[in-house]
Image (spheres, helix red, strand yellow):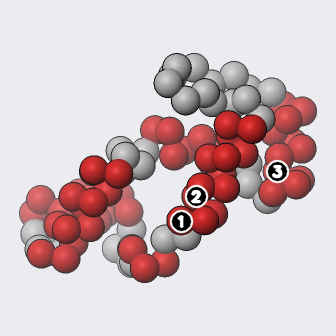
């Protein structure tokens, strides 16, 4: 996936939405951003939260990770802004 950086749009987005381009773009490289992997992670946390298989992901997510705190609306809004600004395109 190609992401084109536009400093003027990035500054306007940060001012308008309080989310930097860099922060919003992290979802694109996040191994758990894909629904299947995230669901697997949640199941592992529930079934064996301190198991060896979940250790690395727990460290990555933070030892205080709480899936109930995930703000789906905020995440979707960040993705919508990336799409609206033309920073990402679906299916490219």
Q: Residue at x 26, y 67 (%)?
A: 42
- CB within 8 Å, label 2 to label 3: no
Q: Residue at x 82, y 50 (%)?
A: 14
Indicate which disc, 3 or 1, sits on the residue closer to the N terminus. 3
Indicate which disc, 2 or 3, sits on the residue closer to the N terminus. 3
**Element type where label 1 sits in the image:** helix
Q: CA distance from mark 3 to mark 1?
A: 19 Å
Neighbours of disc 2 within 10 Å: few (<14), some (14-19), many (20+): few
Residue 63, horizontal then vertical, whole percent: 34, 73
The residue that disc 3 covers is: 14
**Element type where label 2 sits in the image:** helix
Residue 76, horizontal then vertical, whole percent: 59, 55
**Element type where label 3 sits in the image:** helix
Q: Nearer the viewer, mark 2 or mark 3?
A: 2
In the rendered picture of this protein, how many numbered marks are placed on residues? 3
The residue that disc 1 covers is: 72
Q: Residue at x 79, y 59 (%)?
A: 18
- CB within 8 Å, label 2 to label 1: yes
The residue that disc 2 covers is: 75
Instruction: Left or right? Give the position of 35 relative to 83.
Output: left
Query: Is residue 55 visible in this depiction of the protein?
Result: no
Q: Nearer the viewer, residue 24 or 36?
A: 36
Please tell me whether residue 85 is drawn above or below residue 74 in the rendered image: above
Please tell me whether residue 63 is drawn above or below residue 86 in the rendered image: below
Instruction: Left or right? Give the position of 69 relative to 44.
Output: right
């Amino acid at each position: 996936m190609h992401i084109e950086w536009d400093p003027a749009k990035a500054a306007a987005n940060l001012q308008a939405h309080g989310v930097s381009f860099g922060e919003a773009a992290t979802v694109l490289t996040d191994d758990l951003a894909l629904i299947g992997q995230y669901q697997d992670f949640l199941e592992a946390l529930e079934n064996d939260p301190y198991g060896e298989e979940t250790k690395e992901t727990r460290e990555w997510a933070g030892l205080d990770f709480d899936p109930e705190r995930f703000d789906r609306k905020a995440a979707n809004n960040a993705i919508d802004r990336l799409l609206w600004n033309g920073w990402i395109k679906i299916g490219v």
